[in-house]
């Protein structure tokens, strides 16, 4: 193991970073962003409404469900989508994230999906994913309605089955009841069911994580996304762990090494496939088409639609307004929800920053400049990367450290800008993940 990787870094799912604090006014315009040819897209639509207020969640969400605001928001989503219409060749996949999308009346999704299909050329078997909550999936006819509307994949958070950790996090249900409820969904529908598990949680051991994974597969889960708990200074989660004197354990290198060894056990298990560096399955071998395209594994644009959504179009990265009223006002006046934008001058570097999540990259069509090539050669010499035909692959020993590998491709300017973003958010009392007041108390 490289001596540089003594502490796990968070995975990088966007590059370059766009700061709402530093890039206002942008270094480009919307017209510049959309001046190039039509292209295939994946669409991410953020639904910020949520009945939960989990202290570990850093995503933008609203806990009050005002149906008038919901109605206005979905109308703004249609208006924003319509603005991009003439620049889209084909819609390849749709992802509804949140928040908890299924906490709003499901008819809104029927209307929105029909709107997209009427306005855009879409893949014949259009992959549509939605995030949810186990309680809402068991309400009334929720699962059948989702299937009726064309949704094929659902994802929901389990975090852990360990009762002590669940109680500490304020999560509903104990292990046995939760397993029974998941089985009720997986055994009675044809939906592709996926869950999120977290590790390095309070009161959680590496053995608990292995048990969590085995339980998921036993009740019919297809893919499991493994997320290291991220806590940011000033957030409710940080303050709670500080009060409970749990921070030193959370930051412990030896504890991190224990979870690294869990990864090694999973890698050595011939029954488990790593679809991505943090996604495992017993049936699936590749990432789903949405995430593959989002992270540059397939050439396309990502339209980020809705409040706080992020997108990548042409060679421009953008972030939408976080505040719901500002977002709706912006869409109403201009058709766009964009708050900040940044030009990506090095698309090849972007691919390599994101590549550790996807584990591999086809190198045959890429023109590598000297700085990128030198990083790749060094990492091959250190056995972090391996060459196989046209592919450069991440060595399994480093799946756990995918975020650290991504950072190897940051330039000095990137690193300085990332540091500046962190410090400015800290100065303004914002949650560093979403640059808003979410869970800041």
Image: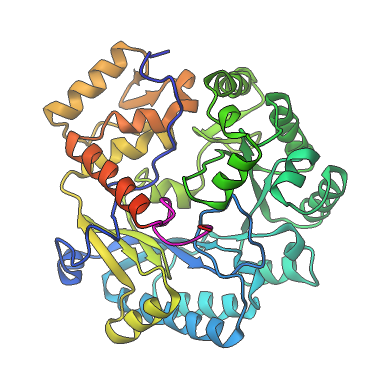
Q: Quadrant of residue 190?
A: bottom right
Asked if residue 187 is positioned above or below residue 374 in the image, the reply reads below
Q: In the rendered view, does 292 fall on the left or right side of 49?
A: left
Magenta-drawn segment:
429-439
In the picture shown, does residue 75 fall above or below 276?
below
Q: Nearer the viewer, residue 74 or 187?
A: 74
- Magenta highlight on residue 300: no
Observer-nearest of 174 and 124: 174
Q: Is residue 265 above or below residue 368?
A: above
Examine the image and state in which quarter residue 246 appears. top right
> Residue at the location (22% across, 36% down)?
365
Name the chief secondary structure element in magenta: loop
User: Picture quarter containing residue 307?
Assistant: bottom left
- Residue 321 seen in the current view: yes
Quarter of the figure with the N terminus:
top left
Q: Establish if 279 lies above or below 397.
A: below
Residue 224 seen from this side: no
Q: Residue 191, image x and y in percent?
A: 69, 56
Residue displayed at 39% across by 41% down: 12
Q: Is residue 433 magenta?
A: yes
């Amino acid at each position: 193991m490289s001596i540089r990787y003594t502490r796990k870094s968070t995975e990088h799912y966007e590059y370059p970073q766009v700061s709402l604090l530093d890039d206002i006014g942008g270094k480009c315009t919307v017209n510049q962003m959309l001046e190039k040819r039509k292209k295939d897209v994946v669409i991410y639509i953020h639904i910020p409404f949520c009945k939960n207020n989990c202290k570990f969640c850093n995503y933008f969400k609203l806990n009050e469900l005002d149906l008038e605001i919901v109605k206005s928001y979905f109308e703004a989503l249609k208006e924003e989508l319509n603005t991009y219409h003439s620049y889209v060749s084909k819609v390849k996949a749709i992802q509804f994230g949140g928040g908890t999308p299924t906490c709003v009346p499901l008819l809104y999704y029927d209307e929105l999906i029909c709107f997209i299909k009427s306005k855009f050329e879409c893949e014949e078997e259009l992959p549509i994913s939605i995030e949810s909550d186990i309680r809402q999936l068991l309400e009334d006819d929720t699962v059948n309605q989702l299937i009726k509307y064309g949704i094929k994949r659902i994802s929901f958070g389990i975090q852990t089955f360990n009762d002590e950790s669940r109680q500490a996090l304020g999560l509903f249900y104990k292990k046995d009841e939760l397993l029974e409820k998941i089985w009720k969904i997986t055994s009675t529908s044809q939906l592709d069911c996926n869950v999120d598990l977290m590790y390095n949680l309070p009161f959680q051991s590496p053995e608990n994580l292995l048990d969590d994974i085995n339980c998921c597969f036993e009740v019919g889960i297809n893919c499991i996304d493994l997320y290291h708990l991220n806590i940011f200074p000033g957030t409710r989660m940080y303050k709670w762990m500080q009060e409970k004197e749990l921070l030193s354990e959370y930051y412990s290198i030896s504890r991190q090494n224990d979870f690294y060894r869990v990864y090694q056990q999973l890698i050595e298990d011939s029954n488990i496939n790593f679809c991505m560096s943090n996604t495992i399955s017993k049936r699936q071998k590749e990432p789903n088409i949405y995430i593959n395209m989002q992270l540059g594994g397939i050439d396309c644009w990502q339209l980020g639609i809705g409040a706080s959504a992020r997108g990548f179009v042409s060679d421009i990265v953008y972030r939408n307004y976080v505040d719901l009223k500002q977002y709706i006002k912006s869409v109403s006046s201009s058709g766009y929800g964009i708050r900040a934008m940044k030009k990506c001058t090095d698309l090849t570097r972007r691919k390599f920053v994101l590549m550790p999540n996807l584990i591999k990259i086809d190198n045959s069509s890429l023109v590598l400049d000297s700085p990128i090539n030198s990083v790749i050669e060094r990492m091959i010499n250190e056995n972090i990367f391996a060459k196989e035909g046209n592919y450069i692959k991440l060595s399994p020993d480093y799946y756990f450290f995918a975020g650290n590998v991504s950072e190897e491709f940051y330039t000095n300017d990137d690193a300085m800008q990332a540091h500046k973003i962190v410090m400015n958010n800290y100065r303004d009392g914002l949650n560093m993940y979403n640059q808003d007041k979410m869970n800041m108390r």
